[in-house]
Image (spheres, rainbow, N blue to C red):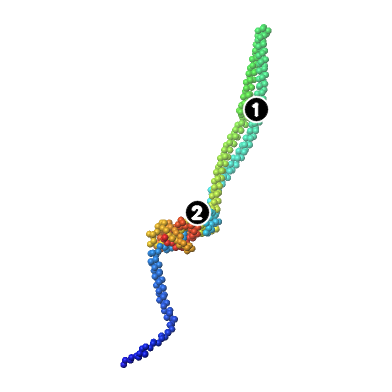
């Protein structure tokens, strides 16, 4: 039988719902779902960043600040005794960087030159002593020569004066006898004297004239002898002084020639000694420079690392100081292979550095498919890692970059963000 509800029962309101307290575990039931959403979002971001973003991004995968390295090496082996450069300090061309001492420098050439100089100096001293001895002998010979010369001239002048007096007396006698002869001739014409008297007077006159001629000739010879003696020409007269003077003159001439030859030899030796002293000086400077060799900087830069401190034993060619050429500082960036067609010399790059609010700009100067060790050794910091097919882009700051800013950014190895501009 079907039961129908009364109208009052139909219209009666429903009773209020009874509140049921939820368990705390029901609230944690949504965490797995939220974790799943988060994991899905991370996977989506990872897929986008690894698969899709590289295809649309123009940034380099890695980039660092770098600069060419300056290797200051030693040309000799030895021990480093001083290092003037300090890390982080600038160096200038010609500045002393280090001093290397080498106690095994070959001195054979210097020893040979010094021995040669001793021998040559000994010969020069002996020659100087011979010159002094010959000069003393010459001075003595000159004294003897002057004494005998003066004595000889005195004798010759005395003989010449005597002959002159005799000549004057003979001339006076000839004049008297000539007068007597002509008087006898007059008296003979008058018949006062005989012809025998005239002949006797004539004979006396002619004898006196002959004697006068002989004395005149002797006087001229004596005058010629004096003139010759004054010129240093002597004729043997049988006297002691006359025989010694030619010998003394010859001795003087021999000594003078000997002294001239010895002086010429001494001058040649002096010239040889001067040249030898110059060579010895150069060799001593070479030995000194190699014994305490001063290493100087050849280019401007900033000292980065003291490879060989004081006391280090180094060989020829070893690096003492590693410096950085901040004037050529720049960026080394690694770009993926897909960006290779967009890279070229002169390509503009934008570089973002964390300490700077505004980016800096650089331009590509060189592209390298790989970076061999020989190339990296020419830079202050090693190049960043690159995947197969990646391209190394070497860039330098644009000319408009402030100099002080580029020098402050000379920090090789520092990571930066680089992208195409």
Position of the C terminus, as image quadrant, is: bottom left
Horizontal side of 215 relative to 3 (left or right) equals right
Which residue is rendered at x = 56% and y = 40% of the image?
Answer: 268
Percent x, y of residue 309: 53, 58
Q: For numbered disc 2, what is the local secondary structure?
A: loop
Percent x, y of residue 229: 62, 27
Percent x, y of residue 94: 52, 52
Q: Is residue 296 visible?
A: no
Q: For numbered disc 1, what is the local secondary structure?
A: helix
Q: Residue furthest left?
A: 1
Q: Quadrant of residue 367?
A: bottom left
Which residue is rendered at x = 61% and y = 28% of the image?
Answer: 231
Horizontal side of 345 relative to 94 (left or right) equals left
Neighbor class of circle 2 (other Cα within 10 Å; few <14, some 14-19, many 20+) is: some
Residue 410 lies, with reference to residue 173, above or below; the image says: below
Q: Quadrant of residue 45?
A: bottom left
Q: Foreground: 372 or 292?
A: 372
Q: Is residue 210 visible?
A: yes
Disc 1 from disc 2: Cα separation: 85 Å
Query: What label does residue 153 carry, if any?
Result: 1
Horizontal side of 36 relative to 204 (left or right) equals left
Counting labels gives 2
Horizontal side of 2 relative to 350 (left or right) equals left
Which residue is rendered at x = 66% and y = 25% of the image?
Answer: 157
Percent x, y of residue 313: 53, 57
Q: Residue furthest bottom?
A: 1
Residue 375 lies, with reference to residue 273, above or below; the image says: below
Q: Nearer the viewer, mark 1 or mark 2?
A: 2
Check contact, mark 1 vs mark 2: CB within 8 A.
no
Which circle's residue, 1 or 2, is located before the other in the chain? Answer: 1
The residue singled out by tag 2 in the image is 299
């Amino acid at each position: 039988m079907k039961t129908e509800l009364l109208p009052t029962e139909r219209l009666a309101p429903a009773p209020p719902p009874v509140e049921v307290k939820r368990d705390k575990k029901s609230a944690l039931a949504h965490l797995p779902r939220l974790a799943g959403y988060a994991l899905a979002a991370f996977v989506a971001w990872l897929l986008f960043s690894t698969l899709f973003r590289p295809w649309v991004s123009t940034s380099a995968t890695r980039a660092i600040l770098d600069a060419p390295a300056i290797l200051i090496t030693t040309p000799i082996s030895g021990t480093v005794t001083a290092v003037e450069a300090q890390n982080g300090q600038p160096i200038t061309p010609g500045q002393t960087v280090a001093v290397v001492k080498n106690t095994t420098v070959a001195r054979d050439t210097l020893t040979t030159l010094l021995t040669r100089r001793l021998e040559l100096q000994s010969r020069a001293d002996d020659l100087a002593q011979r010159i002094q001895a010959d000069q003393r002998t010459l001075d003595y010979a000159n004294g003897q020569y002057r004494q005998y010369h003066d004595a000889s001239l005195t004798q010759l002048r005395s003989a010449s004066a005597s002959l002159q007096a005799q000549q004057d007396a003979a001339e006076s006698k000839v004049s008297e006898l000539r007068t007597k002869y002509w008087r006898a001739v007059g008296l003979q014409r008058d018949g006062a004297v005989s012809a025998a008297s005239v002949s006797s007077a004539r004979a006396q006159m002619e004898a006196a004239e002959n004697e006068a001629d002989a004395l005149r000739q002797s006087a001229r010879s004596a005058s010629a002898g004096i003139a010759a003696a004054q010129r240093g020409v002597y004729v043997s007269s049988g006297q002691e002084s006359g025989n010694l003077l030619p010998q003394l003159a010859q001795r003087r001439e021999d000594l003078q020639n000997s002294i001239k030859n010895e002086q010429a030899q001494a001058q040649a030796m002096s010239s040889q000694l001067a040249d030898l002293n110059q060579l010895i000086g150069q060799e001593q400077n070479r030995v000194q420079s190699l014994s305490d060799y001063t290493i100087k900087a050849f280019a401007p830069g900033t000292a980065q690392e003291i490879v060989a401190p004081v006391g280090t034993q180094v060989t020829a060619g070893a690096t003492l100081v590693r410096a950085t050429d901040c004037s050529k500082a720049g960026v080394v960036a690694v770009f993926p292979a897909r960006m290779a067609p967009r890279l070229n010399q002169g390509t503009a790059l934008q570089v973002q550095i964390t300490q700077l609010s505004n980016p800096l700009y650089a331009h590509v100067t060189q592209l390298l498919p790989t970076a061999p060790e020989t190339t990296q050794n020419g830079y202050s910091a090693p190049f960043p890692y690159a995947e197969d097919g990646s391209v190394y882009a070497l860039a330098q700051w644009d000319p408009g970059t402030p100099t002080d800013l580029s020098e402050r950014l000379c920090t090789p190895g520092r990571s930066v963000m680089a992208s195409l501009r």
